[in-house]
Amino acid sequence: MKNANDENYQSGSTFTGYSGIARKLVLIMGECSHVAKDGFNDYHKYKYASAAGVLEAINAALVKHKVASVVTPTILSNFDVTNAKGNVEHQVTVGCNIMLIDSETGESIDLYGIGTGQDAGDKAVMKAETAAIKYAYLLSMAISTGDDPEADTKTDENSFAEPLRNAAPKSSAVGNTISADDEEIAVCSGCGKEISDKVFSYSMARYKRPLCMECQKKHGKVA
């Protein structure tokens, strides 16, 4: 539904039209500049802006300015993972393309988001789609929720970030971290296998050393 008659149209471009839809997007962004945190995570005890809250705000503004939206999701990856408790869950990553179309001019613009969902049942895809759509709108429309991941000191403390940063490289001390593209990756002190942040945190809390799930089973309770 791109306006191919627009003299500014170029094949392969994700944006067509430079007046009508751009003007409307500015108005929509102004009306949705902030979305309040309307959700609460009972387990981790923090507030967050729900996908429902974000979509309610953006949908009202889109309808008001006569801009339609068409979402096309694509599964990018789908595999099983073992969580910190040893249970198998499905992890799915989805990419969502959101085409915004000015119903009055036919001009359009594409937004894109990526989300990952993990679930033991059949909701991994839905969780991934929800995250992808939510953050596509949040980032593309510069919507503030008051969240700042880098300021989440509580999560850093719970994740044992300090032991991870101070751990010696695998070459000098078995079972701490290895460097990959300037990022530190936790590895098992028993077998040298790479482990996730969640497994690392759980192992440090219970065993006082980084262990993969298999080595945790072998060692039993040693804390």
Image (cartoon, rainbow, N blue to C red):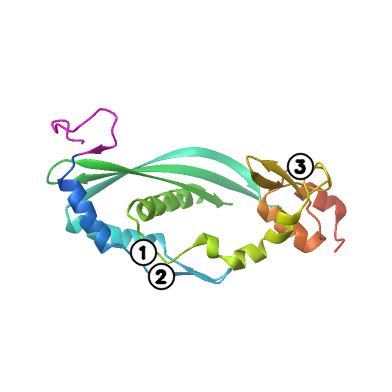
Asked if residue 4 lies in the magenta stretch, the reply is yes
N-term-proximal mark, 3 vs 2 = 2
Residue at image x 68%, y 47%?
A: 184
N-term-proximal mark, 3 vs 1 = 1
Q: What is the x, y in percent for residue 2?
A: 21, 35
Looking at the picture, does residue 197 appear above or below residue 35? above
Q: Is residue 76 toward the left or the right of residue 144 in the image?
A: right
Q: Is residue 14 toward the left or the right of residue 92 in the image?
A: left
- Residue wearing tag 2: 38
Residue mark closest to the camera, 3 vs 1: 3
Disc ID at residue 124: none
Disc ID at residue 193: 3
Disc ID at residue 53: 1
Q: What is the x, y in percent for residue 156?
A: 63, 63
Looking at the picture, does residue 51 appear above or below residue 105? below
Give the CA distance from mark 3 to mark 1: 41 Å
Q: Is residue 19 toward the left or the right of residue 116 in the image?
A: left
Contact, mark 3 vs mark 2 (Cβ under 8 Å) = no
| Residues rendered magenta in the picture | 1-16
Give the CA distance from mark 1 to mark 2: 7 Å
Label 2 crowd bin: few (<14), some (14–19), many (20+), radius 10 Å = some
Residue at image x 86%, y 50%?
A: 218
